[in-house]
Image (cartoon, helix red, strand yellow):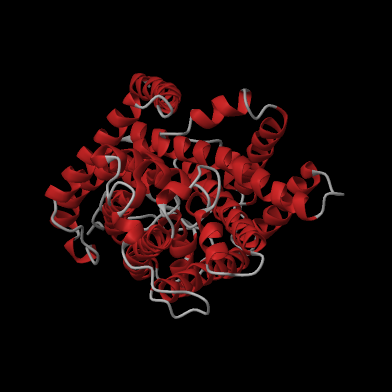
């Protein structure tokens, strides 16, 4: 009697280490998305939306929550180091897994340069005698070493980095609420003046809210890494389900709660793009050296994101190599279960990106950055389409693996797809965002062309 053939949905045993614990995944889900985009970039959103930025974050956060719920459903049923790239391949074919995997890897290694350069700029301000490029080199070497060591070391690094960021936001929310109700020294209750004055809650109407969505939606990028990391935990299916459940709600609370505190305490007209609204609030409530305090928080946030993105990019390219979509030489694993060559390949391209950012920040690197500016929406779109295709197959073939289900399937999945399409259309109508869509569309088209050529070649064989 022959054994039954394996289900097409069954995941291959993961060759990597299983050194990540539940607390690592939970904090990675919370901390991986909290970065400079929130602490500094939110000022640009407030400047265009006013107090309506709260609605902008609710809309963008709701879309991110739907994507993470879909991804959590598939990752709990089929945990893999390539996460959504593997899901796309199973749902749509090799071209989809190849395309989304390489685009996401490209996105992470380019963003590495922004994070490393930003952290180096802050460190150079503290120690002007050390050149900025030296700080970049130090950070890249330190985190390369952390990622080459056992995966539990990466988990510990990220756990404590994320804990500092989460702690900073919780403290900010507590101080902000106390200031709003007038319980801090030398403060009076502020009431609703800043929410209803200066043009009202929506001073620029719903157009301002929509512009705010465009300004903040990409700040939610990074949540996906938790589903990649789940494959290296002791119980991937259960751990990823728990991490996704806890992360999405808390992230939304942190983001929306922070914005509500900021626009309640301070007039929205005082916000300036490029300046941290968090610093403005801390200054207003009398926190000593608020600027330096927030510099430390942003510094930690950048290093945390650098660490998480290096990890995510190495696991993604390793997964591509496992499926024959990247050079097989990247499959070398250390005795501790770490894909050493995949880590080195990712950091090597990261170094190139950093050099381009230091040498040509307003020309070559700007084009490179624009080419990944809207890639996240393409990745999210394929996640949604993959979930639409795989959900029915999982229900039919392995219903017992559906431990985490997408809400309101399939209607909310279609709603998320419509939301992403709307964001792309709005970006095309926005002068500042249009270059990102065009350049990202070109990069996506190039990868899809390569995927198509590979598909035709394989069929001829």
Foreground pick, 446 / 16: 446
Picture coordinates of residue 57 (x, y %)?
33, 52
Image height of 274 relative to 32, above or below: above
Q: Is residue 435 left or right of residue 10?
A: right
Q: Is residue 221 left or right of residue 406?
A: right
Please report the residue visible at 62 percent of the width from the left and 48 percent of the height from the top.
343
Please report the residue visible at 39 percent of the width from the left and 73 percent of the height from the top.
189
Foreground pick, 304 / 241: 304
Image height of 335 relative to 205, above or below: below
Q: Is residue 335 left or right of residue 200?
A: right
Q: Which quarter of the figure has residue 234?
A: bottom left
Q: Is residue 181 left or right of residue 59?
A: right
Q: Which quarter of the figure has residue 94?
A: top left
* Quadrant of the rendering where the C terminus is positioned: top left
Residue farthest right in this picture: 129
Picture coordinates of residue 412 (x, y %)?
16, 50
Mark yes or no: residue 420 visible.
yes
Image height of 329 relative to 454, above or below: below
Mark yes or no: residue 381 visible.
no
Picture coordinates of residue 305 (x, y %)?
56, 54
Picture coordinates of residue 186 (x, y %)?
52, 76
* Figure disc tally: 0
Please report the residue visible at 45 percent of the width from the left and 51 percent of the height from the top.
222
* Quadrant of the rendering where the N terminus is positioned: bottom left
Foreground pick, 42 / 393: 42
């Amino acid at each position: 009697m022959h054994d039954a053939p394996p289900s097409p949905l069954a995941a291959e045993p993961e060759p990597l280490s299983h050194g990540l614990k539940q607390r690592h995944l939970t904090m990675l889900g919370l901390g991986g998305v909290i970065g400079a985009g929130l602490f500094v970039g939110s000022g640009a959103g407030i400047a265009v939306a006013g107090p309506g930025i709260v609605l902008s974050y609710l809309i963008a956060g709701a879309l991110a929550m739907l994507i993470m719920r879909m991804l959590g459903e598939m990752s709990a049923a089929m945990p893999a180091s390539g996460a959504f790239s593997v899901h796309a391949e199973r749902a749509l074919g090799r071209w989809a897994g190849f395309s989304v995997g390489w685009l996401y890897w490209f996105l992470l290694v380019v963003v590495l340069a922004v994070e490393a350069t930003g952290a180096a700029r802050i460190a150079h301000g503290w120690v002007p005698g050390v050149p900025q490029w030296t700080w970049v080199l130090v950070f890249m070497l330190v985190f390369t070493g952390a990622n080459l060591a056992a995966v539990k070391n990466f988990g510990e690094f990220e756990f404590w980095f994320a804990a500092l960021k989460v702690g900073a936001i919780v403290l900010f929310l507590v101080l902000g609420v106390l200031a709003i109700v007038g319980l801090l020294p030398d403060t009076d209750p502020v009431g609703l003046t800043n929410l209803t004055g200066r043009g009202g809650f929506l001073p620029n109407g719903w157009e301002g809210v929509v512009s705010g969505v465009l300004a903040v939606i990409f700040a939610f990028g990074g949540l996906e890494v938790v589903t990649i990391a789940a494959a290296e935990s002791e119980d991937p299916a259960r751990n990823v389900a728990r991490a996704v459940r806890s992360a999405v709600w808390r992230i939304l609370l942190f983001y929306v709660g922070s914005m509500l505190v900021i626009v309640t305490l301070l007039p929205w007209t005082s916000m300036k793009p490029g300046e941290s609204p968090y610093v403005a609030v801390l200054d207003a409530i009398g926190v000593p050296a608020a600027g330096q305090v927030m510099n430390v928080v942003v510094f930690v946030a950048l290093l945390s994101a650098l660490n998480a993105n290096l990890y995510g990019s190495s696991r993604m390219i390793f997964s591509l190599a496992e499926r024959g979509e990247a050079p097989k030489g990247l499959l070398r694993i250390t005795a501790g279960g770490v894909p050493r060559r995949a880590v080195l390949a990712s950091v090597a391209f990261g170094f190139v990106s950093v050099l381009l950012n230091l040498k040509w920040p307003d020309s070559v690197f700007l084009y490179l950055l624009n080419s990944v500016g809207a890639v996240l929406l393409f990745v999210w779109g394929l996640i949604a389409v993959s979930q639409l295709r795989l959900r029915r197959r999982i229900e039919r073939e392995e219903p017992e693996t559906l431990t985490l289900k997408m809400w309101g399937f399939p209607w909310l999945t279609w709603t998320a797809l419509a939301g992403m399409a709307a964001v792309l259309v709005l970006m095309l109508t926005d002068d500042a965002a249009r270059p990102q869509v065009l350049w990202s569309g070109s990069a996506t088209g190039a990868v899809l062309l390569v995927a198509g050529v590979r598909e035709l070649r394989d069929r001829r064989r």
